[in-house]
Amino acid sequence: MGYVKQFMQYVKPYKWKIVWTILIGILKFGIPLLMPLILRYVIDNIIGAENLSNSDKITELLWLMGGAFVIFLILRPPIEYIRQYLAQWVGNNILYDLRDRLFDHIQKLSLNFYSKTKTGEIISRVIHDVEQSKNFVITGLMNVWLDLATILIAIIIMLTMDVGLTLVSIILFPFFGFAIKYFYGRLRRLTRDRSQALAEVQGHLHERVQGLPVTRSFALEDYEQEQFDTRNENFLNKALSHTDWNAKTFAVTNTITDLAPLLVITYAGYQVINGNLTLGTMVAFVGYMERVYSPLRRLINSSTVLVQSIASIDRVFEFFNEKYDITDKKDAKELGRIDGAVELDRVSFQYDEEENQVLKNVSLDVKSGETIAFVGMSGGGKSTLISLIPRFYDVTDGSIKVDGMDIRDVKARSLRDNIGMVLQDNILFSESIEVNIRMGNPDATDEEVIAAAKAANAHQFIEELPKGYRTMVGERGVKLSGGQKQRVAIARVFLKNPPILIFDEATSALDLESEHTIQEALEKLASDRTTFIVAHRLATITHADRIVVIENGEIQESGSHDELMRKKGSYYDLYQVQNLDNEPELV
């Protein structure tokens, strides 16, 4: 059953509520089973009673139907309500638990995983497939048992009336077993293929919606339409294959359910003609055929639903079982507030075993409060190096120590509590500016948020916005300029107040005026903190205590701006290429 056993761990806390739902459901489905018995009694014992006068027949009929009305009008509705509510309550709570755990799982997966996986496919599994898994609870753990109980009770009642006719009624049951065994193995695979094709459409759509400005700027609408059509057509083909096989399944199984009542009517009619069976019993049996074969049809439908839900469960738990690249050791320590000394000891790193090393034997000793700038050509390993410090990835060889402790020996979250990052493309969430700044410290007061914004040179532009700090920034901060987004991101780090800072191309995408404003805020932020800077514009890092030139994953040279200029090595060449000798420095 694939990953169903894992899924059942989420069902276990609700097992008694499921039991109660089934028991109440048996009452709900059991009450209508009285109807053929009532009909039989009316035909044989009231209408066909030769020893009763018409007046007595009417009196007995009214008493019988009065009792029936009490059962069906007073007793059955609350039972129906309670069963429906309980079933949905259990299903929705299991989904809540599952999504809650999945979101926790999403936050723990490595950045390496996300670099290889489309966001839309993840969303498809968390939303669509989890929702489909609810059918396993409602149908597989509740309705199937209720339908089986209904069939069993109906057959027991039928046996008390006529054994031979009951055997005729259920003679086609084995054919259902063969049909289900034949059809549903393949149906599960086809369902899984369809779900995967849908996830690919969703993943592609999510990515292309985010990249719509690129599509328009390059006038790629026709090309992108073809790309989407390819994936959409693939989903259509998978869906039609699934529909074709599903239709065959229903054609066979429904034929069997239609033949069974015909057999009963034929045999019962023969027995009534020969005087071996009462008319009321025949009518009751025909009524019970509907009570038996309707649940049986539902079981066939349930089989289809279960196949779909099991395929979705498989996809959910495939994702659930993705391994974490970064995990805390069992004896990992809480780091607490640190001074900020960082030591890189012969660090090497590669993203995958089959790929080349991105960093090779990098060693660096950084004192608390020191500012270190990494420079070099693109692809040299600078951004990779700084992503190792907050342990977004683990080193392949060597070690990184903070205040003398290997970062693999401490809890990753406590390490990141001590690090603030300002990136080239800082992601803002589609909420208010206040909420985005407060992500640096969710418990901060309004006064602290404003103070952080002032320190980041952001307060003035925020106040000029229509709703000030409550202005919604749009998805990924689209309503703000690049410089405004950066200042909000810097304010977020001011509010966090970490001892270690990382700036990765924090000003490279900005105009000179915005860069100057943000550079001031960054220098204020970096005061008395250990700071790592990656920058292409060398004029922004000449103030650094040390400048480290990284080429092809190795440190080529290291020193202050003046030392490296006198040395006339790689840094000097880079500086000359940027033609900065005659430009005014912005630091």
Image (spheres, rainbow, N blue to C red):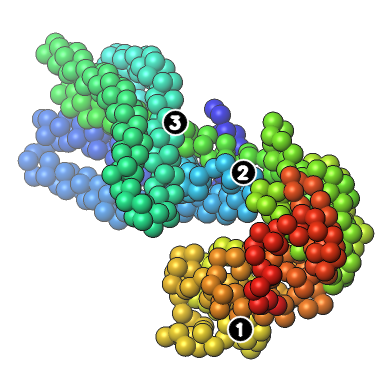
**Is residue 497 placed above or below 321 in the rendered structure?**
below
Q: Nearer the viewer, residue 280 or 99?
A: 99
The residue located at (22%, 45%) in the rendering is 64
Q: Is residue 543 left or right of residue 453?
A: right
Please tell me whether mark 2 or mark 3 is closer to you in this view.
2
**Residue 232 image offset from top left, x and y in percent:** 33, 37
In terms of secondary structure, where does tag 3 sit?
A: helix
Please tell me whether mark 3 or mark 1 is closer to you in this view.
1
Q: Residues within 10 Å of mark 3 (few under 14, many from 20)?
A: many
- Where does label 1 land, which residue? 457
Quarter the N terminus occupies:
top right
**Is residue 260 placed above or below 333 in the rendered structure?**
above
Q: Nearer the viewer, residue 145 or 581?
A: 581
Please tell me whether mark 1 or mark 2 is closer to you in this view.
1
How many numbered circles does the render carry? 3
The amino acid type, in three-letter code, at marker 2 is Phe
**Residue 257 image offset from top left, x and y in percent:** 26, 22
The amino acid type, in three-letter code, at marker 1 is Asn
**Is residue 494 placed above or below 70 in the rendered structure?**
below
Quarter the C terminus occupies:
bottom right
Q: Is residue 349 left or right of residue 427?
A: right
The residue located at (34%, 21%) in the rendering is 159
- Where does label 2 land, which residue? 113
Q: Is residue 362 left or right of residue 174?
A: right
- Where does label 3 land, which residue? 192
Q: Earlier in the sequence, mark 3 or mark 1?
A: 3
